[in-house]
Image: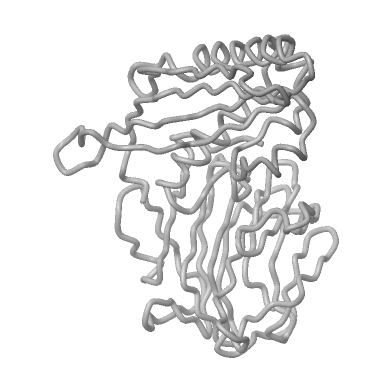
Amino acid sequence: MTVATTTQYWNSRMNGNNPVSLSGSFQDSWTASVGGGVKSGGDWVITNGTYTITPTTNTAYTFVTCLSYNTAPNDDEVLIKLDNGTHKIEVKGTGNATSLKLVGATTVTITDLDLLLTESKPVPLILRVTLDELGNAQLYTHEIMQNDDAVNVFYSVSGANGATKTIQWGNTNGSIKWSNVYYSKFGAFNPEELMTSDFSQNVLSRMGIGIVDLLKNTTRIYLKTQVPISNILYGYDISSDMLNRYTSPNIHVLIEGLDSPSFDTLGGSKVLENYDVTVYVTTRGTNYENAYKQGLNILGEVFDEIYTNTGVNATTDSLVSYTAELDTKKDDDETVCVHTLTLTYMRKIDMRHR
């Protein structure tokens, strides 16, 4: 996993307005290559129109859209195309409103969709399509990577032979409400690596998941050899029932909160933000002394790794304080030791990528 950096963002963000004249900072507008569309409510509605951007040096792309049908396009109608000059993938219609096709060197059909919004309490479909420089493509629905049983639910194909670098979306038949279209030329990012909200990206991906990835890739002795990679996690669920499912030791990273003490420039184009990042190190053993010392060794390496790699850039990222709570045994039956490290970051955030 490679979390998008502060210089990798959505360089085009269409939220229901004319794609050829997008407003806001750091925005690449689209070129109407066929026909056009019309604004209706909060959507850009197309019956005969396609829009393109031609990348220059970049060869890995991420495309996210939220859409629904007024009427279904024809079978094999190309709705989305990503071509990096070497590899190409397309999302095509199937002639109905319950499925789509992801087409590369092979074809995968995505079923059980509700593109006409006929179900009870329907919501438009969010699609994310990625293509990397080697031609590997993924498609995600509703920004979900795994289902409730921790099974992957995205779709993968290898790209077919490409022709010319092109990012294209739209339709030449049917009637489609394109509510939103986001595009990044900076890489092929899954839903955890580049989120649609810049606020969420800074909080969860860059601060939370980014630190998880850092700890997974360290070469320090305890973190590399004593803690399974699968046991280094973001703390979505740190209930006792969940912790008991993991073998000891394990590490959970959690963003406890953030605040912005000041806007750094007039107009708020850049702000200073403080993030509280909490790391829980859980060890277990009937000999509590051993569990305590193992946990402290792991916690120490966590601090050293985070400090040396993420906390000493004074212009954008800086650790300004930390606290550590070391767990001691207070009950005869206690076998689980949880050491806690809370770090406070000060970050300078560019607010113009929204």
Q: What residue sits 56% from the left and 28% below the top? A: 211
Which of the two residues, 215 or 131, is positioned nearer the viewer here? 215
Which x, y percent locates residue 42?
Answer: 38, 77
Horizontally, is 233 left or right of 306 in the view? right
Which x, y percent locates residue 96?
Answer: 71, 86
- The N terminus lies in quadrant: top right
Q: In the picture shown, does residue 283 fall above or below 199?
A: above
Which of the two residues, 256 or 155, is positioned nearer the viewer here? 256
Which x, y percent locates residue 16?
Answer: 40, 71
Q: In the picture shown, does residue 322 fall above or below 203?
A: above
Tell me the colour scheme of the image.
one colour
Q: What residue sits 60% from the left and 86% below the top? A: 120
Q: Report the residue that reaches farthest toward the right.
A: 106
Horizontally, is 112 left or right of 316 in the view? right
Which x, y percent locates residue 278?
Answer: 50, 29
Q: Report the residue that reaches farthest toward the front.
A: 332
Q: Would residue 71 be seen by someone viewing this image from the given angle?
A: yes
Which of the two residues, 38 or 296, is positioned nearer the viewer here? 296
Determine the image quadrant of residue 14. bottom left
Q: Would residue 159 be seen by someone viewing this image from the given angle?
A: no
Determine the image quadrant of residue 320. top left
Q: In the picture shown, does residue 26 fall above or below 318?
A: below
Q: In the picture shown, does residue 192 fall above or below 285?
A: below
Q: What residue sits 40% from the left and 66% below the top? A: 15
Q: What residue sits 45% from the left and 64% below the top? A: 31
Q: Report the residue that reaches farthest toward the left.
A: 266
Q: How many marks?
A: 0
Determine the image quadrant of residue 63. bottom right
